[in-house]
Amino acid sequence: MAQDVDLSQVDRIIAAHGSGAGALIPVLQKVQDALGWLPKPAMDRIAAGLRIPASNVYGVATFYAQFRLKPVGKYIIKVCHGTACHVAGATKITEAFERELAVKDGETTADRMFTLESVACLGCCSLAPVAMVQKEAHGRLTGDKVAKVISDYRKAEGGK
Amino acid sequence: MASQTQKIRITVGLGACGIAAGAQKTLSALEEAIAARALDVDLSITGCMGMCYREPLVEVRIPGRPGVVYMEVQPDRVPRLLDEAVAKAQIIPEWVATGEDGGGTEQAFLARQKRIVLRNCGRINPEDIEEYLAAGGYQALQKVLSGMSREQVIEEIKQSGLRGRGGAGFPTGQKWEFCAKAPGAEKYIICNADEGDPGAFMDRSVLESDPHSVLEGMIIAGYAIGSNHGYIYCRAEYPIAIHRLNIAIAQAEKKGYLGERILGRDFGFHITIKEGAGAFVCGEETALMASIEGKRGMPRLRPPFPAISGLWKKPTNINNVETFANVPWIISNGGAAYAALGTEKSKGTKVFALAGKVRRGGLVEVPMGMTLRQVVEEVGGGILGGRKLKGVQMGGPSGGCIPESLADTPIDYDSITKTGAIMGSGGMVVIDDSTCMVDVARFFLDFTQKESCGKCTFCRVGTRRMLEILERITEGQGREGDIETLEALARNIKRGSLCGLGQTAPNPVLTTIRYFRDEYEAHIKEKRCPAKACRKLITYRVIAEKCPGCGVCLKVCPVKAIRGEKKAPHVIDPELCTRCGLCMDKCKLKAIEVI
């Protein structure tokens, strides 16, 4: 995996943000946007580019929930576990996704199609329980609807 | 206001809730259908109208007639909406949420509200500064810059009695004064938009619906304090808010409300957006500043307070989104007008994200002093599905559950604090009798335990220990003395933590023990969950008399725990059953129950 990383993109992002510690988080965010995750060679390059220790880069990348140190699937499924969703049965929704995708929460399917995640709150409380696939929210979910959501995405992929 | 030349205006609510409910598709359907019918109308967008439970919402405004907000306008409702409500100007009564003529089914939702922070939300196009200006926007800034001294601005805010809406409730005017008087030429203004409480979406809605009101509040604060640079620290999970803030900043710069020599005066102000990276603790001010500086977001000891030594060690003033959004209104209408609303010690209004088991969930703004029951019953329309109100969770993971018996508590900082909860930033989750309070406490501890930054041992390890005990209790492994151990841990975590996260993390447990001790005892002593929510303590069962043996549950069960012949009542094997509830969801005849 490591050899595939396009470091020229990383260099361009660093150049656009200048140096210094203050630029670290925005640079990590942009690099993750570009690559989908933060491979180790990219983090090393960021450390060199911003002239800060690699340990700082790694420390920040592991502190914040947003940063991923593993590659992700094409579709990221974020199951909301906010208060309103929790009382509306969010745990069952995560389980339904786990069953449908045959992965555990936080994992990616073998075909790299889906990554299943739990998030704290998506803020669409009136639609609880909610899950977001990419930028599309699916509200008032039930175990049943979860199966349909997944099969719809699979169909859309298969149809191409 | 209506003139002959004015066009019919159709506005689609495009807040995140609306979009989640499909408003973007409604907008596209409207665009197509308007073009197909060659209708001469203005199609525009707005932010959050507040009625999340009726999204997508579309307002139709025909010149010379009262405006009407239509609800649940999915694309299939678009043709009739255009043909009747627009082309023929005939109101479609069964779809009306609220009409300016007083019609519609949702008037009660608005009747008790007082909109100051949300004054423009759902009314103006948040991506067009002209609409903000037409609604009186930037007039407060004009007023400030054309003759008010810095001291006068601070005095006006002090007079308003405005207190920090992020939750702690510190008087805003006083905070500004500390920072204004702090020595140093370089100072910073920070808007805390890292709204992290699960179940809270007030700040997101304001930023998405009326970003200029927040910018204007920040610019005024910059003038009052003597700062030329502001940061908005916004959750990365709010892409629409960030997008609209970027547009708003660019437009304000173009119009001369941001930049050098604002409105020709010797005062310049710039605003930078910093995207958060997903750490709840960054809602704490010192952690937030560490994050802007590019570090791990860990809090530090105070003093020195940010007003003396904050971002980059310069004097810094931090307020949250709602606090800033109040500022232009206060300057325009006077501190006294604001102070006339609310109670003796809590002035003005408060915005709440009303959610949970309530009929009308959405974004609401009510005067301080209204009771919780009034908000739940009158604004929220009572409990969903005719169940019973059990309590109201306020303040998210830092707050607590206020029981139904205290629902007549007025909403003000001091009364709410007395119950053991906190006002918090505005999350208000309504809980009914199907919710287990021990599980709610476990839920919040799970959250704070994960989000603890790890700096203070009591917070890092203590919340973990509390969570383990709560997990045991909800799994039927509770022991005598668990409640006392929880209380002792809670006391120590509160005392031994540096920042608000740890100091308040035990609140959900303490309030549920205080008000719902019987539920804890039922779990521990009788291994029973009174709300029938804790999985290890319940059993799913087929009600034989209701079951026709259709086989739907049998097919849907992922672990094959259901057996039965066709057309004969089925049976669930409790040993195999994982309590996933799929069979119950699927059974249309309600022949499956939880015991």
Image: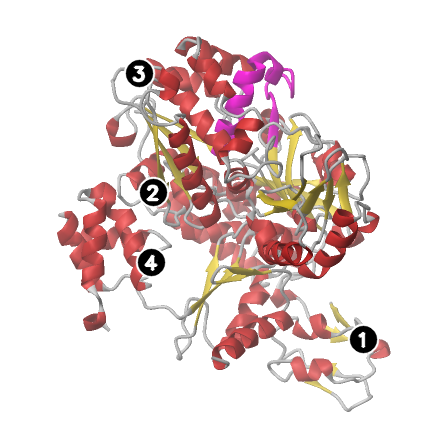
Q: Which mark is residue B543?
A: 1
Q: Is residue B443 visible?
A: yes
Which SS class for mark 3? loop
Q: Amino acid at mark 4?
A: Asp
Tell which residue pokes out farthest to the right in this image: B545
Apparent side of residue B111 relative to residue B425 in the rendered image (left or right): right
Q: Amino acid at mark 2?
A: Cys
Q: Are marks 3 and 2 on the same chain?
A: yes
Q: Amino acid at mark 1?
A: Ile
Q: Main secondary structure of the magenta part?
A: helix
Q: Are marks 1 and 2 on the same chain?
A: yes
x and y percentages locating residue B203 in the rendered image: 51, 39
Q: Which residue is mark 3?
A: B182
Q: Which mark is residue A33?
A: 4
Measure the alpha-carbon separation of dots 2 and 4. Answer: 33 Å
Residue B589 versus residue A77 in the image, above or below: below
Q: Are marks 2 and 4 on the same chain?
A: no
Q: Are marks 3 and 4 on the same chain?
A: no
| Magenta-tinted stretch | B321-350
| Circle 2 Cα neighbour tier, 10 Å, few/some/many (<14 / 14–19 / ≥20) | some
Which SS class for mark 4? helix
